[in-house]
Image (cartoon, rainbow, N blue to C red):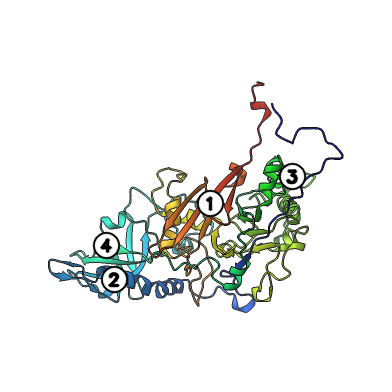
Amino acid sequence: MAPIQGLLRPYHKDEKFALQNREPSSYNPLYSYRLSRGEKKQYVQQYGDMYFLRLAKLKPVVEKIAEEDWEDFEIAGEKAQRVDRVLDVRQGQLCWVVGTIYMDMPLKPNILEDIGKEHWIAGPPPRHSYFSADIETQVMLEDESGRLRLIGQMLKNNLLVTGVIVAVLGTENANGDFEVLDLHLPELPPQPKRWAGEEEEEKMDVDQPRKKIALISGLDISGTEADTLRISLLTEYLLGEALDDDDRKEASTISRLIIAGNSVASDLMLNHQTSTEDGKKAGNRKYGYDAAAYNPSPTEHFDQFLAELLPSIPVTMLAGERDPANASLPQQPIHPAMFPHSRVYASANITDPEEVEEPAWLDSVTNPWEGDIDGWRFMGNSGQPVDDILKYVDLGGPDGSNTDGRMEVMVNMLRWRCGAPTAPDTLWCYPFQDRDQFVIEHCPHLFFVGNQPRFETHVIQGQDGQQVRLIAIPPFHETGELVLVDSETLEVGVVSFDVHDPAQLDGS
């Protein structure tokens, strides 16, 4: 095997090496999904208020789009009339109305049924899909007045899930069903311009070298599997310690690393029913806590990984489904106390954004998250909203492994103007009372979703000139892929890390 240029050669003590400097990036995190603390944070309120808040926010947007398109719509001389409420629809009248979609699906979890069951019955296994080809899915449109069943081919031509705000045009038939002829979504929200503020515009220097933002997800650091070699290769690459001068120079252009969740493997807890030395089962521990059942290796290895990177590169860390954070959305930042070695780079106050003057080098953020990097508006999550939305549609496989619909879901999340439409119906979330924080008020320039089966990217155009780069980030633990985004053009590239098994080589 021929040596890589400059890598496998003798070292000369008089040899000089070029010093590589990492260019800093302009970084302004937005604290859109931070929850209140203390007495203000409570779960006694009803979740139904979220749907009313979402409808109140997006109804004027959808009404404006529908009114412009259907103003002159008529059939057989009858013009379409606007109806304010769902229950005001009259049979045979050509009209349009705005409401919230509700999907009545046979396999969808039902909290009332779960409460009514005997407590000793074991819970059902996780469902890969709520869709069933044997039982028809009923689509409803609801508002504060009631519900109306929707039918028609138009529903099959559009991706709809519970929680989406739509305007539907049609007539009510003799059976009381509303036959949809056309429908409208809120579409993409207004998009802020890059470097919208004058102060930020002055910071932009066209003579600076091209910078890149690295995106990664699904590190799944376990501490029990032989996954340290691939993590070591990733660390060396990001620190500019690998390969030749050109690769080290390219690594120096990476100005920030974004970790999109699932950094720690799910085997944090070992078997609780451990046995004592004499073979007997250990008794219950005080307060139900058993220190012997906790496995600190995953967080320790992840802490070491961060501590190696942070002196050289800033890190934005989202919480994920398997990370040590709250399970319901929006997941709050992983507390720096979990990382004794790297927490010196974190902010002293992660709970009150108003007291933080500038973001720390290790920025532990919420999931979902949004912020400005080099003038671009970034928005992303760790994958739970996309995974839950795909349970509402026919995935084409018994295990829900089909990946073809994920870009379509990401596009529709922006068109719906909602980052988690199925919350709180089938996706755990906090019961907001003042406003639905999952409503997308500003269109991002880049929208990423972590922990997806494979890498995908696409660029979409909005009706008002919006342009959004979509990125599906694969789990690094399975694919070894790191996504790089050009901070000037938002063009995307992938760097793959692979460890070959010598047993698989044929010796040639």
The N terminus - image quarter: top right
The residue under label 2 is 68
Decide: is 408 above or below 333. Answer: above
Residue at the limit of the structure toward the front, as seen here: 207
Query: Is the residue marked by circle 2 packed among few (<14), some (14-19), or many (20+) residues within 10 Å?
Result: few
Q: Identify the secondary structure beneath mark 1.
A: loop
Of 169 and 64, which appears nearest the observer?
Answer: 64
x, y percent for residue 367: 57, 62
- Is there CB contact under 8 Å for labels 2 and 3? no
Q: How crowded is mark 4: few (under 14 residues within 10 Å), some or many (20 or more)?
A: some
Q: Single out the mark in the foreground, 1 or 4.
A: 1
Q: How far apart are marks 2 and 3 (CA)?
A: 58 Å
SS for callout 4: strand
Q: Nearer the viewer, mark 4 or mark 2?
A: 2
Contact, mark 4 vs mark 2 (Cβ under 8 Å): no
Give whichever of discs 1 and 4 has the lower sequence position: 4
- Distance from disc 3 to disc 1, alpha carbons, whole Å, reads 25 Å
User: Which labelled disc corresponds to residue 241?
Assistant: 3
Query: Which residue in the protein does label 1 denote?
Result: 491
Q: Seen in the image, is 97 located left or right of residue 499?
A: left
Q: Residue at x 27, y 68 (%)?
A: 69
User: What amino acid is found at the position of numbered circle 1 in the picture?
Assistant: Glu
Disc 2 residue type (three-letter): Glu
Q: Can residue 474 be seen in this view?
A: no
- For disc 4, the marked residue is 182
The first of marks 3 and 4 along the sequence is 4
Tell me the residue at 61%/72% (across/down): 199
Determine the residue positioned at 42% across, 49% down: 405
